[in-house]
Image (cartoon, coloured by chain):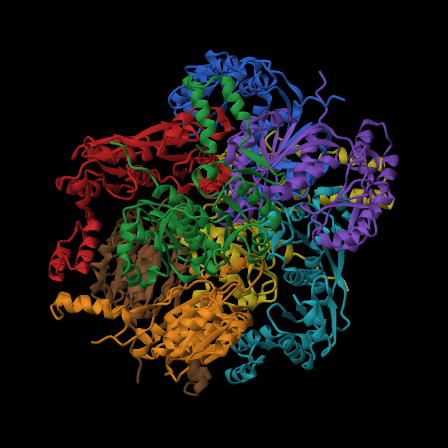
Chain colours: A purple, B blue, C red, D cyan, E yellow, F brown, G orange, H green
Amino acid sequence: MDNKHEILQLLRQVADGNTTPEQALTALKRQPFEDLGYAKVDFHRSVRQGAAEVIYGAGKTAEQIIGIARTMGERGCRNILITRLDAQPAETVAQVIPVDYHPIPRLAIAYPDAHASRGKIVVATGGTSDMAVAEEAALTAEVLGNHVVRLYDVGVAGLHRLLSRLDELMDARCVVAVAGMEGALASVIGGLVDCPVIAVPTSVGYGASFGGLSALLSMLNSCASGCSVVNIDNGFGAGYLASRINQMEGLED
Amino acid sequence: MDNKHEILQLLRQVADGNTTPEQALTALKRQPFEDLGYAKVDFHRSVRQGAAEVIYGAGKTAEQIIGIARTMGERGCRNILITRLDAQPAETVAQVIPVDYHPIPRLAIAYPDAHASRGKIVVATGGTSDMAVAEEAALTAEVLGNHVVRLYDVGVAGLHRLLSRLDELMDARCVVAVAGMEGALASVIGGLVDCPVIAVPTSVGYGASFGGLSALLSMLNSCASGCSVVNIDNGFGAGYLASRINQMEGLED
Amino acid sequence: MDNKHEILQLLRQVADGNTTPEQALTALKRQPFEDLGYAKVDFHRSVRQGAAEVIYGAGKTAEQIIGIARTMGERGCRNILITRLDAQPAETVAQVIPVDYHPIPRLAIAYPDAHASRGKIVVATGGTSDMAVAEEAALTAEVLGNHVVRLYDVGVAGLHRLLSRLDELMDARCVVAVAGMEGALASVIGGLVDCPVIAVPTSVGYGASFGGLSALLSMLNSCASGCSVVNIDNGFGAGYLASRINQMEGLED
Amino acid sequence: MDNKHEILQLLRQVADGNTTPEQALTALKRQPFEDLGYAKVDFHRSVRQGAAEVIYGAGKTAEQIIGIARTMGERGCRNILITRLDAQPAETVAQVIPVDYHPIPRLAIAYPDAHASRGKIVVATGGTSDMAVAEEAALTAEVLGNHVVRLYDVGVAGLHRLLSRLDELMDARCVVAVAGMEGALASVIGGLVDCPVIAVPTSVGYGASFGGLSALLSMLNSCASGCSVVNIDNGFGAGYLASRINQMEGLED
Amino acid sequence: MDNKHEILQLLRQVADGNTTPEQALTALKRQPFEDLGYAKVDFHRSVRQGAAEVIYGAGKTAEQIIGIARTMGERGCRNILITRLDAQPAETVAQVIPVDYHPIPRLAIAYPDAHASRGKIVVATGGTSDMAVAEEAALTAEVLGNHVVRLYDVGVAGLHRLLSRLDELMDARCVVAVAGMEGALASVIGGLVDCPVIAVPTSVGYGASFGGLSALLSMLNSCASGCSVVNIDNGFGAGYLASRINQMEGLED
Amino acid sequence: MDNKHEILQLLRQVADGNTTPEQALTALKRQPFEDLGYAKVDFHRSVRQGAAEVIYGAGKTAEQIIGIARTMGERGCRNILITRLDAQPAETVAQVIPVDYHPIPRLAIAYPDAHASRGKIVVATGGTSDMAVAEEAALTAEVLGNHVVRLYDVGVAGLHRLLSRLDELMDARCVVAVAGMEGALASVIGGLVDCPVIAVPTSVGYGASFGGLSALLSMLNSCASGCSVVNIDNGFGAGYLASRINQMEGLED
Amino acid sequence: MDNKHEILQLLRQVADGNTTPEQALTALKRQPFEDLGYAKVDFHRSVRQGAAEVIYGAGKTAEQIIGIARTMGERGCRNILITRLDAQPAETVAQVIPVDYHPIPRLAIAYPDAHASRGKIVVATGGTSDMAVAEEAALTAEVLGNHVVRLYDVGVAGLHRLLSRLDELMDARCVVAVAGMEGALASVIGGLVDCPVIAVPTSVGYGASFGGLSALLSMLNSCASGCSVVNIDNGFGAGYLASRINQMEGLED
Amino acid sequence: MDNKHEILQLLRQVADGNTTPEQALTALKRQPFEDLGYAKVDFHRSVRQGAAEVIYGAGKTAEQIIGIARTMGERGCRNILITRLDAQPAETVAQVIPVDYHPIPRLAIAYPDAHASRGKIVVATGGTSDMAVAEEAALTAEVLGNHVVRLYDVGVAGLHRLLSRLDELMDARCVVAVAGMEGALASVIGGLVDCPVIAVPTSVGYGASFGGLSALLSMLNSCASGCSVVNIDNGFGAGYLASRINQMEGLED
């Protein structure tokens, strides 16, 4: 049972008469986050689920990151994702807490631990230069316990490269399509598969790509049904959502 | 087995040696769509699955719509969605083929038929005026066989209205959050639930809402994980994707 | 020899000593256009070449259009294109001068006449609703003496429909790719063919298509080489340029 | 009586007959600012009121800042705010005049002095990274004599963190809501409190946050009444306006 | 005690021990809004305070508006504002419930009643054509019990017209500055007065005013301290906020 | 001496000791405008100078326009420009006061009177459809006493049409260049003449002309020195400024 | 007689019969520019007039600048403006050719020489930080032989600073109004003076100033007649145009 | 036979009965690209045709570029273009494989070899600073076997420089018009020549050029027929397309 559920289940139990209001209030007072001054750290979920937590690294000092991660680690969190962490502060962090660092997506995994590898998520990119965002998505999904297949450099200008990997695409429970420039990859994949497709526009490109705007608009206007879009360069968000979808329980009959 | 799968499975069977290339080529020649001149109509899927097909009504004459729908209907399609259909042409269509017309979302269901009502999708709106888009999403999802719960007028400026319906939200397998103006509804719901959230910005608003741009950007920048966004006013796309997610099979262990 | 060439050849002849300056000045005084007050009509080219002239119909009264077209017709112009002409003024025009009117692209051909049908230009559209712009391109190219093949409703969300027409695409000397929404059609075709591809974004769509901006940016950012773009909805410009390319003479060895 | 009042009261006194025009003109000639060449320094207000003056530090050299601040200090100004001052020039300034420097908001207070701490302004942020702007607002308000309560990292994606501090919010006479990304914080707070809410969009974020544009539009479109917005990252402006509101005198009955 | 306060005070009383949790829960069950299906109507506040409620009229049928207003009126609400209501539906509404209709700002006051006229709010406009928005602000403020002074057509291109009314401006407790085109009015007034200034950009203008964008940006960038901005054409929001500020109680010493 | 001068000269005379403050104050009290409630009418200038006054017609009722114009006319104003006045209200106005109405630029001249025709202003357009804006500029300049030469339909795509009128351009004291679409006319003329060039972008065009934005940006970026730009479609502003420049007095030696 | 005039006068003389075509052609062959490979240098004008030429320094190497300037200098050009030249390359240039360098506007004057100081141009700025652009305008105008008065830091938020300098403004033959942020300075000055006003938006500011866009739009929408706008930060263009206007000859009677 | 043709011809041969499906499948298995992990390298075309291949250098390490280029070179590719390659990595590359490096367009040609120089392409620029983009286009076209003529610094503000080179323009089979700022060059050239014109907007400029947006829009809106546009700064794309057009075979009669 995670933190949000904890609170709300509590309220429902009160409503159902299964918990007295007094008990509920006492429970609510056990503050579900620790206040470090510069941040309020949630830590319940990971302990219970082995699921990863995330620290958005941009704009935080190495010291703040260490503070937050250590607080989590000491509570038992494992596989804590630290996104947008440059190599320099990553080294500082690694001297204090155990960290696996991936330089291309600038992603660190603190207190790394074994995790499951279930279902199947395909992460595809239009070009080589979309790889940083794609790896953020792929590593996020892996750390959250999903099996990930990478299909990189399969952009629509060379359709044969994409079509030669159709088998991989058809088996996926969820596809993350990462592309800059014209962003057509999401449309084409959306027309080929039947599972949900999460499109990630990247800021890769020049001229009228306007920092990812072109790919973003293209993906929003995709004529293929079953697609949705996350923010430009938001590999973490795509990987996280793909994990939620991949790990859906089946409908009871 | 639907059309896209049909083709690709075929190719895989050839690759696996289960089908000879000659058989594959013969199969491929059975053209999977009918060419009406002004449109190429796919019709395989619905026959097999009872799933709905969609006709984008905007910019088509009543005659073209009748032509496409009747072609489908005669092949056995049921519950064919016709989106963005004004009342005037809807009447013309209804004189020729059986149609359920919903004036608020300007949505028609041709050859209406019984359908399942499985799982649970919540469709929530920020205000009363987002209802047209929300109904497009809700009806789409219902016609595709999903159970839909509507939570309308629960915008974040009156947080107590949203919180009073937390039970409904917590049970959903997928939430569609429909909002114009500031679009904050998606962020707040995204922080409250654990299932995938599909955000639909609407063009409702005035001034600096810029035809839905404000809500779109707000939703893309949502700090809550697990959210993704479809195009402005794209109720159909949200309902279709929500259906895909709601009807996910569980992971095999 | 057309009007522009006329002037400039003249200057070159002077430079080469083949014409005296006095002769050149006399020639320059024969004004190459007629001034109707509200417009300055060029008419030389068509007389010599049988090539079409174009009148941009938007914002002109039926009377002005008749005035310009008749001036041209009386000088011997044939197959004069009148673009963006609504049905109402088209009828008025047709009562005075011979006109073939095409209601979907709102295009009239005044003083229609036989014309050649050489080479091969493919005009492809993503959807049915891009047809108006595509027909403006196709009719323009035909009137200019080119053979045109139409491939409509072959958008990338149903890739099998495009791939089933690969033969037609591979034979073209020039392809005009017309698409709204995400505009991916140009990228995909650009990756499939070796001839020049002219992309025409259309204003078809809703929400974040922003009146064709999304398709425009997508096409500009196309990763496929050999593509270029004309203005949103500019079917005439695409058809005109496609004609120039299709009718290129071969290189002398 | 401050500078602007001084001039205008003067004019009203003339209009009322309480001052002769000659006296008014003489008064007007006492130039209310000192011209340093590169700047015209107002200094009247602070002397009288103990209120802070502000120097916009960006694009000024340390020497210019020292020149302006010293001119004020010598006239008796205290608690002079210097905004957007980097650490490097701040050190140079500190060697010459007394300065309290705050590195996170890059804000210096020259000639620091005791000040009141009246009423109650709450400064809230969506995330840790909005802290720089929030501190500019908070310190500005404090220096102007207001009591400030900080509620940082209470973004709407974790609604429980905000709701756990409702007491603080309900007591405020004015709330400054600082948020980047989706900017929903202002809407939610605006729906919870009855006092004026000043929204400050920040340029924190990436991708489609477009340097604060997303938060700006979101806040302008806030459905909650009682909100208004200042420029992106304009912590000083928010703190200054909050002070004006917090220090309103009551209506006479 | 209004609705929001009601709930939150309740929670605080529980926290303080002044209310038992059981009592709190019972209170919470008395739903503070009535659900009409198409809308959820809040009605507590006005009954107690005589303060106005607002119905956003755009996109609602006359029947829906009547339904919402009558529900409020029957609970004792008076001076209910209905904004953006065209003359046609206004007539329909007026046949059923008592209404004062103002055609220029397209604003109706349902169940009109006597109200106070306290303090002083100045509403100023740059030109005659900003009057509709200004009247929405002025009438809103008046209905909420404030004394309003109108200064119309005092744009900065004719500075003498503004300066001739300095007396009025200097006395205000709050100024609402309404302007389209270049929006400079807010900056100039902001530099002349010491009270809070609420800037309202209007969509009045043409060309590069881009529907109010120019005025909006201009006002956000105002160099004068003490200004904040509401959405384009949002007269209601400005009037409402001005009322909050005008009616501030004084600080206790 | 016009109104603005009147006031400011007065202040200077006081400063110079040529006027006593009492006299100045008395003069200032003679309000230089008449307040009609919905507008404040300036009328001094025209009486003295025979110069035109302007009423911006858009968004005013025929009655308001009559009110303003008659107030001016009765004070002796002549040649009062009423811009953006549709044919319908123009007829109503013409029944009450003497008016010359020009339907293409939708411009009326009330109380028309003889005027001078001095110097030389060239008004040039890129195409026929820019004529409405060009006529607003030309008529404005003529009514203000300038000699105007019209060069219409001389866009840069047919350079010979422009070059054939070089004589006219070279003689001008000021050129107004009116163009939509790509706006190149201003650059080319700016490179050909030595007098000031006022560029007027028009909203004529389609697709990526974005309501005149393309022409506006093009003109702002003109590489030719001596050009400046007014708002999109602002023919009046261009004509007014051209008049100021054309009527400059020479420098004294 | 300058270069452009030279060519065109020639053509007119031919048209008038005052020059034979042969003479004209010979004259035309004397190429009016020297081709350095990387640039084509015009040099006629300055020799005759003592007027300044301009070299746009951005994106050119010191060597290229020296090459262009020396070619001009050797032909007798004096007071050659080199804009956007950083201090580093300026030093390199100064070692080879005589140069006066102004670091704030990053402007060099090569082959400096005495020049006239006629008429009166006022250059005004909103703030201290607009000084770089203002100095580019002022120095350009001075070098072109105009008398320039600087009014810096007279922004509209402190109206008394502007009003205290009204004398200077009223005497100008042309005003250059330089302002970033809200750009209101141009509107206010435009309402105070009767001479042409050239508005220069600057990229100074932050947040929603969007690199000068806010000031640009504000200035384009100025309600004051007689204003026109040049590109963002284009001090040179403003100074050049101001010079043209200031040096207008008077109308002959 | 190149790679794309290889695949598709194969499919057509199967359709025509000239190849058995088994043969086709075997052929398809010979993967037409080599997978280096970080890239999938196509190499067929160049071997056959001596045509250049292109590597987009931006965002790739020197090692990756060497890997890709060497793979191609070892297969026999010659004249491999490496675009957007800075001088630093270019040196590293040059130590390992034979490379001609052009610093201005930051373009390398790996495994340089003799090539043809057929037909005639003109590359024209508006200014000196557009030279980097123009050289990318020119070198690309040359390496692909075309004869290229450069006309640099012929912008429309000095029309005589362009007109003096009319001979060169009139002879071209294709013109590439490269311009930043206002982009008028494409319109003017488009009106002067009869061959296809490819417009390349550049990001050169400042202020309202908005990184090439102004030139892009201007070029899209060109009133001259026969123009099309590629992405901002996309010299390679323009050169590649110009080559396709220049090398068109003539129509068979």
Classify A248 as above or below F111: above
Q: Quadrant of residue G21?
A: bottom left
Point out the image quarter for the C terminus of chain A: top right
Which residue, as the protein is rendered here, is positioned at the far bottom?
F17
Q: Quadrant of residue H51?
A: top left
Q: Residue at x 43, y 62 (%)?
A: G231
Q: Residue at x 12, y 68 (%)?
A: G20
Front-lying residue, G99 or B42: G99
Q: Quadrant of residue C66?
A: top left
Q: Residue at x 46, y 23 (%)?
A: H11
Q: Is residue E65 visible?
A: no
* Picture coordinates of residue C122, whole percent (x, y): 36, 31
* Picture coordinates of residue D70, whole percent (x, y): 67, 79
Point out the image quarter for the N terminus of chain A: top right
Classify C212 as above or below G121: above
* Picture coordinates of residue B143, whole percent (x, y): 57, 20
* Picture coordinates of residue C16, whole percent (x, y): 18, 58
Left or right placement of residue C199 versus residue B181 in this view? left
Front-lying residue, A242 or C161: C161
Left or right placement of residue A129 versus residue C72 in this view? right
Front-lying residue, C245 or C46: C245
Classify D246 as above or below B73: below
Figure disc tally: 0
Front-lying residue, E45 or G241: G241
Q: Is residue H142 visible?
A: yes
Left or right placement of residue B49 versus residue H137 in this view? right
Classify G123 as above or below B136: below
